[in-house]
Image: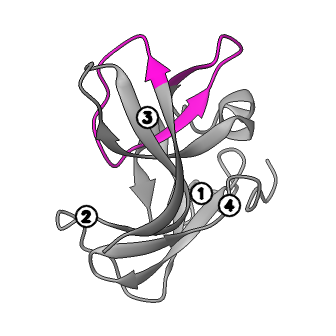
Amino acid sequence: MNEFVSSRQSATQLLDLFRAVSINANGEIHYTDWPTTDSTSQYLGIILSNFITTTDYEIVHSGLIENNGWSWVIGKDIYLFYNGYLTQNIPINTDTKEWLGPIVKIGKAVSIHKILLYSSSLGVYGS
């Protein structure tokens, strides 16, 4: 059972479920374009489901969310990555060890298929 805070949002294109999205000035959602600071600062949440119209989505902002397709390491943090994907690796340049952009921690794995999603306003660590 999912326990979360969510809202209904619209997009101008079809989006995949369980990806991170941001909201633009027109109030439409799109994949979070990490490491673009504007996109990560407008991070909204994770797409949970779509409604009858194919471009209206339920976006989870915080709480527990489950996806049987995930395979997380329990207890590790979850970060935003490219094109709305999520990762448990801090996104850094492996050669220089420098951050590639704002590091945005959005949650923590509580099981291999479930994450505790933090509030959208938390977790930006710098650029």
Q: Which badge, 1 or 3, is on the more N-terminal residue? A: 3
Residue that numbered label 2 is attached to? 67
Name the residue: 23% across, 25% down.
52
On the image, the x and y values in percent for residue 32 come to 54, 35
Residue that numbered label 4 is attached to? 119
Q: Mark 1: few, some, or many residues within 10 Å (few <14, many ≥20)?
A: some
The residue most toward the right is 126
Q: Which badge, 2 or 3, is on the more N-terminal residue? A: 2
Alpha-carbon span between mark 3 and mark 4: 20 Å
Q: Quadrant of residue 79?
A: bottom right
Query: Which mark is on residue 92?
Result: 1
Q: Amino acid at mark 2?
A: Asn
Q: Amino acid at mark 1?
A: Ile
On the image, the x and y values in percent for residue 96 come to 65, 57
Q: Main secondary structure of the magenta part?
A: loop
Q: Amino acid at mark 3?
A: Asn
Which label sits in the foreground, 3 or 4? 4
SS at mark 2?
A: loop
